[in-house]
Amino acid sequence: MEDALRETFYCDYTHPEIQKQADDIADKVEDAHAIAEKSFLFVRDDIPFGFDLYKRKASETLIRGFGSCWNKALLLTALLRCNKIPAHFGSIPMKRTFFSPVLGRLTMLMNHPFNHCATHAYINDEWIILDSVLDQKTYDTFFKPACVDWGIDWNGKDNCRLYTESVLGPMEVYHDIDGAVVNKTGNKEMPELIASLMNNHLNKKIWKKADIQIK
């Protein structure tokens, strides 16, 4: 359990911005379960979905104000650990078509399987999967019209799992967060300059369609 509370280079929860946000979330809330719910909702909706590089610290994602599954899962892990709630960064193997409502044919450029990232949190004496990647606007714009058979809400007790029709295996928990980030959780990424240019292009299109304003 000790490793689920440890700070690392990428899970840098003593960064002032992470600490401030974690304190705001925990303000006037004593119950760990309520803190976990508020943390989940903050990362889900206040940090909208947007493509970004793998090698981002949790604090960088918070400051930039958007992130992909790996960025948002890491940020949620950091916020939970900052509030003394054990949490791990992990990934779930998926069919690469899981993101086709957003990317369309570009999904063919993704890994297959693709290791989709989420958070594994210890709440109410059990480990629960929390997937905070899709904010409400992105979900409503791209996935809800596709009539997916899952939602993005967490009922506070069970796993919050997205893309259930595309899951190919169990979650892998990374006890070495930094190693997982550097290894891009086993996925491939274009050279950083090209990836950044493509991410910016895709994000502009996604945010315009979903009416998302990045702070």
Image (tube, helix red, strand yellow):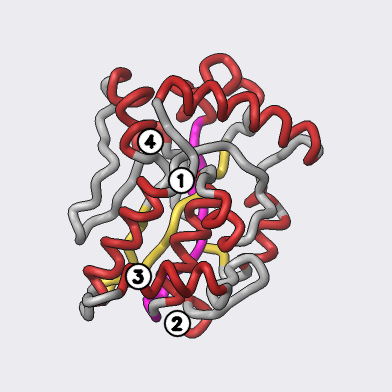
Instruction: Identify the element where label 4 is drawn.
Output: loop
The residue range painted magenta reads 84-95
Instruction: Identify the element where label 1 is drawn.
Output: loop
Quadrant the N terminus occupies: bottom left
Question: Is 38 rendered above or below residue 83?
Answer: above
Question: Is 146 rendered above or below residue 73?
Answer: above
Closer to the N terminus: mark 3 or mark 2? 2
* Front position among marks 3 and 2: 3
Q: Which residue is depicted at the point 18% across and 53% down?
A: 155
* Mark 3 residue type: Asp
> In the picture, residue 14 is in which quadrant?
bottom right
Quote the CA–CA distance across marks 2 and 1: 24 Å
Closer to the N terminus: mark 4 or mark 1? 4
Residue furthest out toward the front:
215
The residue pinned by badge 1 equals: 169
Residue 19, percent from left and from top: 47, 74
* Front position among marks 2 and 1: 2
Closer to the N terminus: mark 2 or mark 1? 2
Residue 214, percent from left and from top: 49, 40
Mark sitting on residue 24 = 3
Quote the CA–CA distance across marks 2 and 4: 28 Å
Residue 142, percent from left and from top: 38, 23
The residue pinned by badge 2 equals: 1
Quote the CA–CA distance across marks 4 and 3: 31 Å
* Front position among marks 4 and 3: 3
Quote the CA–CA distance across marks 3 and 2: 25 Å
Mark sitting on residue 205 = none
* Mark 1 residue type: Gly
* Front position among marks 1 and 3: 3
Mark sitting on residue 163 = 4
Residue 104, percent from left and from top: 52, 16
